[in-house]
Image: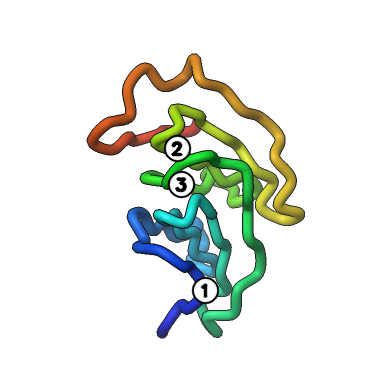
Amino acid sequence: LTLAGHSGEVYSVAFSADGTRIATGSLDRRVKIWNAKTGAKELTLRGHASFVNSVAFSSDGTRVVSVSKDTFVKMWDAASGAEVWSSTSAVHACQDGCICTMQ
């Protein structure tokens, strides 16, 4: 399966818990959501000012979280791509990568 669409290196990849979708975060400051079976791009999430170095799905697959070098953590609706939450207070330093855990 080839996922073509980012214009920069991909730094993070995550599968949804049910295995149907893939999230990728890239140097191009974008998060993309893909169909894991076909490789079709479903969503492009824009909003970070620097590269995205970590992505994760919520356990129920309804949200995607991204962390960027811009020190923002953003939460997105996985169906619509709408940004539903954003914070810099959740990340103190994001120099060598970040891991986010969602409850």
Labels 1, 2: front one: 1
What kind of residue is marked 3? Ala
Lower position in the chain sequence, tag 3 or tag 2: 3
Q: Which residue is mark 1?
A: 5
Q: Which residue is mark 2?
A: 67
Labels 3, 1: front one: 1
Q: Residues within 10 Å of mark 2 (few under 14, many from 20)?
A: many
Name the secondary structure under disc 2. Answer: strand
- Name which residue lies at 51% across and 20% down: 88
Name the secondary structure under disc 3. Answer: strand
Taking 23 as reference, is 87 above or below it? above
Q: Quadrant of residue 98?
A: top left
- Which quarter shows the N terminus? bottom left
Q: Label 3, label 1: how many angstroms apart (C-alpha)?
A: 19 Å
What kind of residue is marked 2? Val
Q: Label 1, label 2: how many angstroms apart (C-alpha)?
A: 20 Å
| Mark 1 vs 2: CB contact within 8 A | no
Lower position in the chain sequence, tag 1 or tag 2: 1
Label ID, residue 56: 3
Q: Quadrant of residue 74?
A: top right
| 13 lies left or right of 20 | left
